[in-house]
Image (cartoon, grey):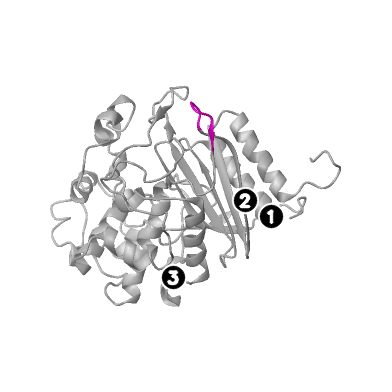
Amino acid sequence: MATTGKPETKREAVQRVLDGVVASGATPGIVTEVRKGDSRWFASAGKADVSTGRERVPQELFRIGSAAKAFTAATTLKLVGEGVLSLDDTVEKWLPGLLGGSPYDGDKITLRRLLNQTSGIYNFSMDPEFYATGQGEAWYERRFKVFTPEELVRIALRHPPRNAPGEAFHYSNTQYYLAAMMVESATGQSYGDLLDRLVLRPLGLTRTSLPTTRTVIPGPHPVHYSRLYAEDPAAPLHDASESNETTAWSAGGMISSTGDLLTFFSALLSGRILNPAQTEEMFTTVPTDGSGWLPGTRYGLGVWAEQKLRSGVPVWGNGGADYGTFTLVMGSPDGTHMVASHVNTDFSPQAYAAFLAILDIEFSDPEHAG
């Protein structure tokens, strides 16, 4: 509590959470940006670079991991709204023969089932051989290697389905590769160009990009400190800031800032970027229970829906992790109150708990005055 005897404000309470997670050693640095109506504020703790002592500041760039799935879904839904695609279109229609000879039926896997992660397609990221190349020192050998989307999809096709199409939610990056590949086939344009034209430029998201093979983060950014998914939780931290993102692409290969993420998700939730019919589709959810994914959530088209806080208050948005970076962006269903938080290290239960604590303070903790 504040020493003045006055009630602790929400901003003071959030700052206490930020200071605490840094003091615990869970992350070198953390930031939170809050927007409520026309007001906004930014808070930070810890360091962007522990070797120089540089602090975390507003408008830093960072890799956003699977929060990129919301951008892929939004781009796809813009094309659905234009009549170029239908959510009932199948993989076989736009990528004929791609799934041939595999355990998957391309006539039964629709664009909707890819985007809500119920297609049953195996996650190429979890293929044992591929996963091993992303751990420890092996990652340094892989980080500049360029993969094509089809190469990574074919890794997934070696594995049996997790479930029948539409039967259950199972998180899989492969599904978002296939969705972007369908977009490219339907339009004859690159996914990156469509993302820029349909989403980034209309919203003025000048700090957001899909770098693909460009390895350097294009602007001021915190060092992305990673243990490179080593099994030892005490493994040393490495600078993982530089890498190509062909292993993440439309499933998680974007760069952004807290400010741009707040703008984007607010636009999604408020219906400013998609037509009403496509907004409704995006936020039509499926349960994630029993999938081993985050508890207390449902999943729409590229968004986490109805993340339940301690009080039962639902917030909506997405989050993502990559090497040395983890972010969460959630807000009220109407998009008027949004919170974005980021740590410059790998996903950890402690960081996730801190993010949820910040959301609790902002949305559902009556003990804290605004």
The image shows residue 149, relative to residue 185, as above or below, that is above
The mark that comes first in sequence, 3 or 1, is: 3
The image shows residue 233, relative to residue 194, as above or below, that is above
What is the C-alpha distance between the residues marked 2 and 3? 24 Å
Q: Residue at x 34, y 37 (%)?
A: 242
Question: In which quadrant will I find the N terminus?
Answer: top right
Residue type, label 1:
Ser
Question: In which quadrant will I find the C terminus?
Answer: bottom right
Where does label 3 land, which residue?
273
* Residue contact between numbered discs 1 and 2, judged by CB atoms under 8 Å: yes
Label 1: element kind? helix
Residue type, label 3:
Ile
Can residue 147 be seen by looking at this rendering? yes
What is the C-alpha distance between the residues marked 3 and 1? 28 Å
Label 2: element kind? helix
Q: Nearer the viewer, residue 321 or 5?
A: 5
**Residue 56: % across, % down:** 54, 40
Where does label 1 land, which residue?
364
Residue 52 colored in magenta in the image: yes
- Mark 3 crowdedness (10 Å alpha carbons): few <14, some 14-19, many ≥20: many
Label 3: element kind? loop
The image shows residue 49, relative to residue 195, as above or below, that is above
- Mark 2 crowdedness (10 Å alpha carbons): few <14, some 14-19, many ≥20: many
Total count of labels: 3
Residue 25 colored in magenta in the image: no
What is the C-alpha distance between the residues marked 1 and 2? 8 Å
The image shows residue 124, relative to residue 200, as above or below, that is above
The mark that comes first in sequence, 2 or 3, is: 3
The boundaries of the magenta stretch are: 49-55
Where does label 2 land, which residue?
359
**Residue 200: % across, % down:** 38, 62
